[in-house]
Amino acid sequence: MIAFIARRAVLALLTTFVAFAAAFVAIRALPNNPVLARFGQHAVPEQVVAKMDELGWDRPVWRQFIDFLVDVAATGDLGESFFYPERVVDGLARTFPATVELTLAALLIAVPLGIVAGVAAAVWHNRWPDYLCMAGALVGVSVPVFFLGILLMVAFQNMPTGGRLPLAMSYDRSTEFIVLESLLRGRWDVAAAALRHLCLPALALSSIPTAVVARVARSSMLDVLGADYVRTARAKGSAPQRVVFRHALPNASIPIANIAGLQLGQLLSGAVLTESVFNWPGMGTYLVAAVQRSDYNVVQGGVLLVAIVFVTLNLALDVLYVLLDPRLRHAPGAQ
Amino acid sequence: MLGVMSACAPPKLTGTLVYARGGESDQLDPIHVDTGESVKVIINVFDTLVTYADDSTELVPCLAESWDTSDDGLIWTFHLRDGVSFHDDTALDSEAVVVSIERLIVPDHPLVFDSVIPYAPDFSVIESVRAVDRLTVEFHLREPSAVFLANLAMFCASIVSPTALESQGRGFSTAPVGTGPFRMEHWVRDQQLVLKAFDAHWRGRPQLDRLVFVPVRESAVRGQQLQRGEAHFADDLPPAELDKLAAHPEIEVQEVPGMNVGYLAMNADRPPLDDRRVRQAVWHMIDKQRLIDVAYAGQAAPAINPLPRTMPAWHDGLVDRAFDVEEAQGLFREAQQDLGFSAPLELELFVMATPRPYMQQPQETAAFLKESLRPLGIELRIVTSETTLHFKRLSGGEHQLALAGWSTDNADPDNFLYALLDPDNINDHGGNNVCRYRNQTVHELLIEAKRTIDADKRIELYREAQELIFADAPMVPLVHTKVRVAHRKELRGYQLHPTGLTWMRAAHIEDGQP
């Protein structure tokens, strides 16, 4: 088990490095010039040339990459945004917690709801609950989040349209995990307000993951429900709910855990559309703006964080499979 | 659960104006920025030596109570207002003005912490600036300049607190200190930027207690917030949204004719566009009124030359080339016979990916032009690039035709004609003469106008230049768009300025309303 995890961890580190290097090269391959972007329509030729030279952005990419690594090794810092004075680390600390809270809230809705819908669809296969759930899932994946978001705002006129806290509420905090931190500090008023602001964006964001989880849950439950041992369990006279929840669902859970894990990774890398509609100060908005104007350091830092999140999740999922599936636990490779 | 939570309404704000806008400010040090989102905060935090009158672009005293000019126009002496203080209690004196201006013109100034200074060339005419006594500042110019005073009214010439610069260093750009009606309170990037009334402002304390800028990226959501009363003021709204809001009983829409121009640039370095008959033919093919209906929801005025109509130097004697297909075909065929290019002529039209204030629907505009030019025998291929890349490629002269435009910096004709059409501004690093227009006579007129202080004589020079430019047709001026903002009716005392800038010092919120 430990050797297995160690092997995976080394692989994860390599993956992260490759992803980072790829992002470093890709963002520089874009024909954009961030120095010109800073000047907008008021570029001063001499200043542009001087600035490019100062930053070393006119050198070959491999040279820039080595310079960057040396720089990081020397300072231990990922640098600063080119457009405003903020360290990339601070920018990520500001936006990633918002993304984490939104993601977790959305998955808290999506996973249970998706499983219930998927299981119901499988149990009443080809009957109205099945049609209803699958039609719902189809709508869920197809409705644009932008439209759904506006629709929710119109439907819930009293719910806030955006942001994480009411404008009038100033609240000194040491992290941007607003819900978590206020709960730990016992600031119930802040927690309630933050949760209230979280409702509509989480609801909008959960539409696609709910649908995806429901479909996977349905098909994997259908597989399992058709298996011999389930028929045996039924033949022995087990109660229907015992057959579904004790015998079938645990065996159907690996694909569900897998898809939920992937959704988690995807949402953690930022949900641009939802963030944009609900004015949610998350990582998606932060990174997309950075890509659009080639804010090199921010893009690199963001990709690094996203890569780390993904490989960590994958590692966690690998371990989780072993725990969920006794066969893997006893396989020779896992020892 | 939603129902229960809806019951607790958000606390009411009084004296606080919530300003919903499309994006976030990058930074707030006046000399380092070029984006509108930064400017709308900066003008409320800082004052300049001179500023515009409340309802026109006439220059009036601000931090400078008065000024006089030497006979040769090379020495300008400004007399500062006494008793003005910065937000950090530093008193405004001539030294503060010297520091603020020297930051723009002295290379490697010790109080400049970033080498990007977009407007530096506008101040290069200043040779030196010195403090004569506590309240008198003297500017020495390299040559007489008619735009010098107008440039001092620009946000980048804001007077900054030297003590704050010294103590904060780079931090100044996120915690700016000026003499303006509002002072920085706090700023959580992408969430809210809060300004607070400055009690000791020399005009008297503003009536608002707080001014909160909130970035709301979707324009439809900005509209929603306005209707609900969550925001009092919103800008950068598309025409359709504004028309809807104008019908709302609690919302008022204000508009001014914008000091801008959207145009079709024709690269004179790329044959056959170097022949003015071809350019004139293109001009004749465009039905501007229909373009305005199609791509601007009717909210723009047709342009005849790059200068906005609201400028005194605008030439009222020029009559636009009529939309006339036969006339166009005649010119085109004549040029074709002389030059021998084949028809249909295939040309690339470069288009920006995102809307600009003067080009609100670039794709629709491009499609309209494509249809317009087809009967002439010109087949357009539309090439769309992300906006900064678009302008980079235009500066490099990669285009044949391109959508471009300009919004005023200082409300001066020089800022349109010299910036957009003088050969001095052709270069690969952001040069704005993207038509690559070179006319020696026009160049001489524009340079002379730059140096001519006498207003009437100056207008004469610009009229002459406009006539020559009109005949050469280096660009097809398309539209001057309106600047429109929407606000709730309980917001009183606010008047949208002709420059489109949003000063909030006179605004207040009527009590008793949500």
Image (cartoon, coloured by chain):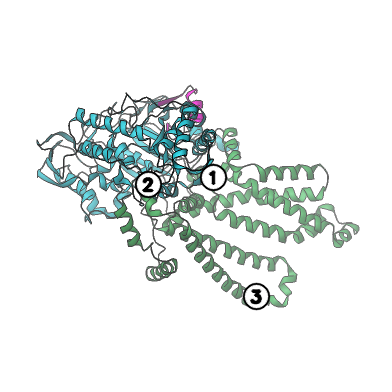
Point out the frontmost of discs 3 and 1. Answer: 3
Q: CA distance from mark 3 to mark 1?
A: 40 Å
**Colour for chain A in the figure:** green
Alpha-carbon neighbours of circle 1 within 10 Å: few (<14), some, or many (≥20)?
Answer: many
Task: Answer left or right for A221 relative to B511.
Answer: right
In this rendering, the answer to whether A127 lies above or below B314 is below
- Which of the chains bears the disc numbered 1? A
The letter of the cyan chain is B
Q: Amino acid at mark 2?
A: Gly
Q: Position of residue B125 (x, y in %)?
A: 20, 45
Alpha-carbon neighbours of circle 3 within 10 Å: few (<14), some, or many (≥20)?
Answer: few
Q: Is residue B239 magenta?
A: yes
The residue tagged 2 is: A40
The residue tagged 1 is: A195
Q: CA distance from mark 2 to mark 3?
A: 56 Å
Name the image quarter holding residue A244: bottom right
Nearer to us in this view, A105 or A91: A91
Point out the frontmost of discs 1 and 2. Answer: 2
Q: CA distance from mark 1 to mark 2?
A: 39 Å
Boundaries of the magenta span: B229-254
The residue tagged 3 is: A1
Q: Quadrant of the N terminus of chain B?
A: top right
Label 2 near label 1: C-beta < 8 Å?
no
Same-chain status of marks 3 and 1: yes
